[in-house]
Image (cartoon, rainbow, N blue to C red):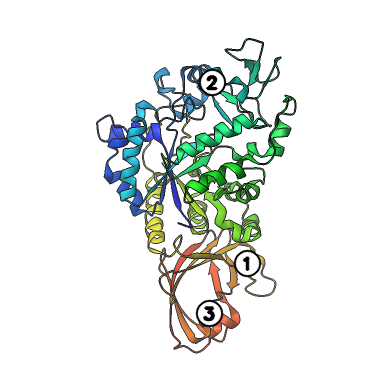
Amino acid sequence: MTHPLLYEVNARQWLARLSLKYASTLSLQQVPEVELEALQKIGVTHLWLMGVWPTGSKSRRQAQTHNDLRNAYNEALPDWTEADVLGSPYAVEALQVAQSLGGDEGLAALRAKLSTFGIKLILDFVPNHLGLDHPWVTNHPKRFVGGPSSFADSFPAPTTTEPWFIAHGKDPYFPGWTDTVQLEYRRPETREAMTALVLSLTQKCDGVRCDMAMLLLSDIFERTWAHVPLEEPRVSGEFWQAAINRVKQERPDFLFLAEAYWGLEGRLCELGFDYAYDKNLYDFVVHDQPQNIQPHLLGLGVHNAHRAHFLENHDEPRISTEVSLELHRAAVVLSLGLPGMRFLHDGQLEGVRRFARVQLARRADEPVDPSIQTMYAPLLEAFAKSAVGHGEGRLLSPTAAWEGNPTSLFFTVVLWLDPDSEAQFDLVVVNMASHQSQCRVSLSIPGLSDKTCILADRIGCETWTRDGVDLVENGLFLDLPARGAQLFSCTLSARTLQPSAR
């Protein structure tokens, strides 16, 4: 699958919600097939089951006592209790599915069910740090960043004969995460152990979303931990390149998705990641900077096929709270219509507004927003019936509709070739500006001058008939209202029209 459609669910909160819906305590193996069928119908190819790993008692205690987090729980889940605070699933105690979710056996059963619907399973790989309760903290303390004396964001190792302090996990711009322990990637033993862990996941799932993947890049890691020197031996080279190559030797189809920021997405894909977050596109959308979207996407060029395009995930605010309904709709068509990974988040399609904290066992019960639900339903149905995601996606370069008209800069146009028919293609057209805009695009379809092209909007009511000669000589003229979006089904037939005068 070249252009997957990923759907993220918080495993703990998903099961809690399904248990209420079906009035029975459900584990992973008991997820009703009708729920998976619903995902299949909207075109989902990969389910990211976020947060299946257990959090130990020490890390959970940190989540229960952290004042800022407790305040955040009040906003996310006003009726929360201490029992709801399970701790962060990114403070991993072990890569064994939490027994409260059904254990490894329950996951295997769910994966088997998913396969019957053509859906693959994605799990978390947290490479930068582990939880306070992980057995390595006691059995292998030297696998973590540490030293003989205390330093910022450190704590005493629990079992060493001589004084030894190890670091909490962190990125270079924030204090340490006090429920975690920082892995030491300058040490060969650590790299070998972490490679073995990700290899073990190839038996449990079909791919991994790698948390904060850029933190392991050798130069980033060196700068972050330069204040904690490491004696020899030190390892050189990039962990990701070696680890991904090792995994792909055993499972070439195993998918690697990088959570990545700071403009480092391209480097990670060069090291072997199949996809990396497109956070720049997300920021341009939510901050309503339409003038930056087309240059960004055209600048990526073929690398768009290695980006994950999203409007929501568990780290970001709910998109329904960030943008107007009109901009929301345009952004949905944009993010679903681009080459690469298309990415949806549980609750997004219903207009959920509360940010759900990952430390909590459940999320707040919210009513469905009918305006958002009725917006998504026909869009997803139309995309599922189109060539988008299935064929070859080409980002086109809009040009001015006439001299002195700059509004072509606000368009994103993607041509999707139908893999099953040379006479059929789809065209995604989005005007992200807050005003009407016009452009022309060259379709570059072989033999187009000998054809007539019928364009029918799958998400609207417009149908156009255009002569191939006119399209070749002048390009396709597009005129969209503010935040306008179209998904054209385009059919080529023998030429019957004369070129238009325009």
- Crowding at mark 1 (Cα within 10 Å: few <14, some 14-19, many 20+): many
Q: In this rendering, does residue 221 appear at all?
A: yes
Q: Nearer the viewer, mark 1 or mark 2?
A: 2
Q: Which mark is residue 408?
A: 1
From what the image shows, is residue 33 above or below residue 436?
A: above
Label 2: few (<14), some or many (≥20) within 10 Å? Answer: many
Query: Is the residue 250 above or below the residue 27 in the image?
Result: below
Dot 3, how many residues are within 10 Å of its Cα: few (below 14), some (14-19), or many (20+)?
A: few
Q: Give residue 501's position: percent from left, percent from top.
A: 56, 87
Q: Which element type, helix, strand or loop, lies under badge 1?
A: helix
Task: Determine the secondary structure under disc 2.
Answer: loop
Identify the residue shown where x is 67% and y is 46%.
263
The residue shown at (32%, 51%) is 117
> Residues at badges 3 and 2 in contact (C-beta under 8 Å)?
no
Q: Nearer the viewer, residue 118 or 388?
A: 118
Judging depth in this view, the residue of 180 and 399 nearest the camera is 180
Please tell me which of labels 3 and 2 falls first in the chain. Answer: 2
Amino acid found under the numbered disc labelled 3: Pro
Instruction: Inspect the image, locate mark 1, and give the three-letter code of the amino acid beneath it.
Output: Ser
Question: What residue sits right under mark 3 in the picture?
Answer: 446
Q: Position of residue 489 (x, y in %)?
A: 43, 70
Quarter of the figure that contains the N terminus: bottom left
Amino acid at dot 2: Leu
